[in-house]
Amino acid sequence: MIVNKKSWWVLVATLLLGPTRLDAQEVTVDVLMRLRSVSDVQISPDGKQIAYVVSTPSFETAAHEAILYRIPVAGGTPLRLTYRTRIFNRPLPSPWLRWSPDGSLISFIGYVDETPQVMAMSSNGGEPWALTSVKGGVTRYEWSPDSKQIAFVASNPPSAEEERRKKEKSYVISVDRDQRIPRIWLQEIPGGVPRSLTPADKTVLDFHWAPDGKGLVYAASDESGFNASYNSVVYAISSAGGEPHAIVRQPGTNRMPQYSPDGRSIAFISSGGRGGMINAQDLYVVAADGSGGPPRGLTLSREVWVNEYIWAPDSRSILYIPLELGERMFEQAIYHVSVNGERSEVVTPGHVVNFSLSLSLDGRRIAYRSVESRTMGDVYVTDLADGRAVKLTDINPDLRKLNLGDLEAVHWKSFDGKEIWGLLLTPFGYRRDQRIPMIVYCHGGPIGGYTYGLFPQFAHRVGQVDPYPVEAMAAAGMAILFPMPRGGSGYGVEGFRAIINRWGEDDYKDIMAGVDYVIARGIADPDRLGVMGASYGGYMTDWIVTQTGRFKAASTAASICDLINLYYFSDAGDFIVEYFGLPWEKTASLIQHSPITHVRNVSTPILIQHGESDNRVPLSQAQEFYKALKALNKIVEFDIYPRGGHVNYEPPLEREYMLRNLKWFQRWLKPDSRPELTKERKQ
C-alpha cells in the first residue's frame, strides 16, 4: 500500500491516540479564553421567568464583562436586558442579581461613575436606574418583603476631616484604629436617604429580612478581614432601629442566617461551637424567639461545608448545596433536608456541580447554574414535583466542536492503605497502550479540592482565573492528575485535621502514590513528569521539588515557601497557628515544614509566578524562594504579574499566565507533536 506523507501522519496519530474528529477544533489557550460563564441565576417570584448574568472575558477592557438576560421557564430565546449599563465585574463578576418580591423589578449591582451601586430595571426590560448613591459603593443588598425598602451593607463614609487630610496628603493610616467596617443600612424605595441600622464596631457578614419586614437577622464579628467569618455571632434587630440582641453566640463560625417563611425559625451555617477554620460548616436551625433550646444541626452526620441554602415555603425543609461531601467527592448536588431530622435527599442526581440556587415563591421550581463534566455550566430549572431538570441555555455552543479530553474519577491506595481519590484528564482519543507525559496539579486550600468542569478547581467562578490551562495541556498530548490528598476535601473533618503539624508529610505521600498508580496503569511516562499548583498547591509544588528529583519540570504560583513569614505578612496568617502554633513557640516545626529549608535539594527546573499585589500569599514568598534558587545556581525563572492578586482577574494577564505554563511544560516534558495531523484538521 502506498500512502503520501500527510496520510501517513494521520494514520500514525490515529493509531497512537485513537479516533479523532477531523472536523473538530483543538483546544488552545485562546479557545479557553473565549469561553463564557454564568455568574448568577435568579427565578422570578411567580416562577415563570429566570434572570441570569453571563460573563465574557474581554481583552479590550481587561475584565470579565457581564450581561443580564431573561428567559422563560418554559424555554425559548433568551432576551438580553443590559447594553450600556456595566454590571459589577471587578475584580470578578458579582451581580448580586435579585427580583423585587412583587416581581416588578430586576435589580443588580452596577457601576455609576465607576462606583458599584444597586441598580434596578423593569422586569419587562428598559433602561436601568440607580437605587443607591453610596459614596463608597454597595456590593450586597436585599429587598424588604413588601418591596418598599432595601437593606444593604456599606461602610461609614469618610469624615470631612479625613477627606481634608487625604486631599492635603497628611492622612496617616492608624492600624486597628478608626476602621470603617461594613454595617447594615436601610433605604426607602424610591428616593429614600440611607440610615445606619447596626453598630459601627462590628463587621457585618450577611443578613436576611424577617418575613413581616419588621426586623432583620444578621451575622457579625468583632474582627475584620479573613478571620471575621470564623469568629461570628448571629444577631436580630428591629428594622426601626435599637439595640441588636444575640440569637446565637458561640465560638467559631455562625453565618448566613435566614428566617423561615413563617418567621418562627432561623437557619444558619455554623461550626457548631468549635473555633477555627478546620471544621465542617453545617446547617443549623434555632427558634427565632430564643425558645426551644440550643441550635439543632441538620447535616451533622455528613460533615458538609454548606455555602448556599434556601427555605422551602412551608418552613418544614431546606434546600442546600454542600461544597464538601465525601461520598460525592467531585460533585455538588442540590439536597433537600427536613428541619425535623437529618434525612437528606438528592434533588439533582448525576455528575454535576451546582451553584446559584433560587426558588419560586410557591416552592415548585428551582433555578440554578449546573456544570457538567465537560462544560462551563448552563442555566437549569427543576420541577420539584417530578424531579425533571431542564437545561434552558447553551452558553458555549462551540464546546461541541472541540476535541475535549476525557476526565475520569480515579482512586488508589496510599502508603498506609488509605484510599485516595483524584481526577485524571487524558487527551482526546488517547489509547491506553501509549505512555505520555503527565503533570500533577496540586490543589489550593489546604481545605480545597476539585470538581467536574473544564476548570476543575474553579467551577464556582469564571474559570479563566485558573493559571493552568489543563484542557490545552491535554490537547498538547499531556495527561493531568488532580490528586485529592488528605488535608483537603473529601475525607471529612478527620481528613482536614490529618495534616495538623504535618504539612508535606502524609499529603505528599498520598500524591506520590497517585503518581505511581498512573505509571502502573501504563499511562504516565515516568521520565516525563511535571508538577504544578497555586496557593497551598504552590506550597505542595515547592515542597515536592525539595523532596524528590522525579519531576522534570515544575510551575509554582502564589506559592508558600516560608511558613514563619506567612504568619507575619499574610492577611490570613493566623491560620498557620491553627495548623502549627505560634512561630515563637513552634519555631522548629515551622522551619522543618518550610520548603525554603530544603531548597538546596531542588534539581527540577521551576517556574515561579506571582501577583505583585497578593495579600494572601505576599510576593516576598516568591522572592525568597527565587533568590535562594538563583544563589544555588538552580534552573529557575520568575514572572511577576502587575496588579495581580492571589489570582489574576484581568483576561490579558490570565492568557499570558496560561500560555506561559503551557509552553513551560511543553519545553521540559516534550509531549509528542503531531504537526501534519494539526494541519489536516485545519482544512
Image (cartoon, rainbow, N blue to C red):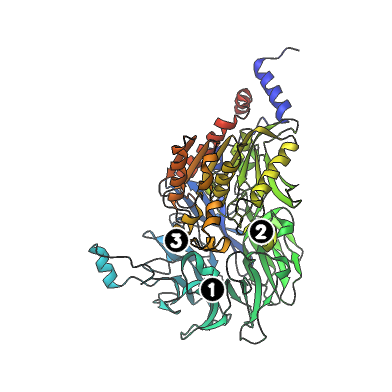
Q: Residues within 10 Å of mark 1 (few under 14, many from 20)?
A: many
Mark linked to residue 498: 2
Q: Is residue 235 above or below residue 591?
A: below
Asked whether the viewer can see residue 458, the reply is yes
Where's residue 673, x and y in %? Answer: 61, 26
| Chain-order first, disc 1 or disc 2 | 1
What crowding class fits label 2: few (fewer than 14 Cα within 10 Å), some (14-19), or many (20 or more)?
some
Say left or right for 415 vs 108.
right
Packing grade of label 3 (10 A; few <14, some 14-19, many >=20) is: many
Identify whether 679 is placed above or below 410: above
Q: Which numbered dot is residue 357?
A: none
User: From the image, which quarter does the N terminus lie in?
Assistant: top right
Reading the chain from its start, which is encountered first: label 1 or label 3? Answer: 3
Residue 593 seen anywhere in this rendered image of the structure? no
Residue reaching furthest top? 2
Q: Which residue carries the number 3 mark?
A: 110
Give whichever of discs 2 and 3 has the lower sequence position. 3
* Local secondary structure at mark 3: strand
Q: Quadrant of the C terminus?
A: top right
Drawn side of residue 382 relative to residue 256, left or right: right
Q: Secondary structure at mark 1?
A: strand
Q: Amino acid at mark 2?
A: Ala
Q: Which mark lies nearer to you, 2 or 3? A: 2
Residue 189 in the image: state x and y as whole percent. 45, 75
Residue 195 in which image quadrant = bottom left
Provide the secondary structure element on which disc 2 rests. helix
> What is the C-alpha distance between the residues marked 2 and 3?
44 Å
Q: Position of residue 5 (x, y in %)?
A: 65, 16
In the image, which is nearer the foreground, mark 1 or mark 3? 1
Q: Residue at x 64, y 64 (%)?
A: 305
Residue type marked 3: Gly
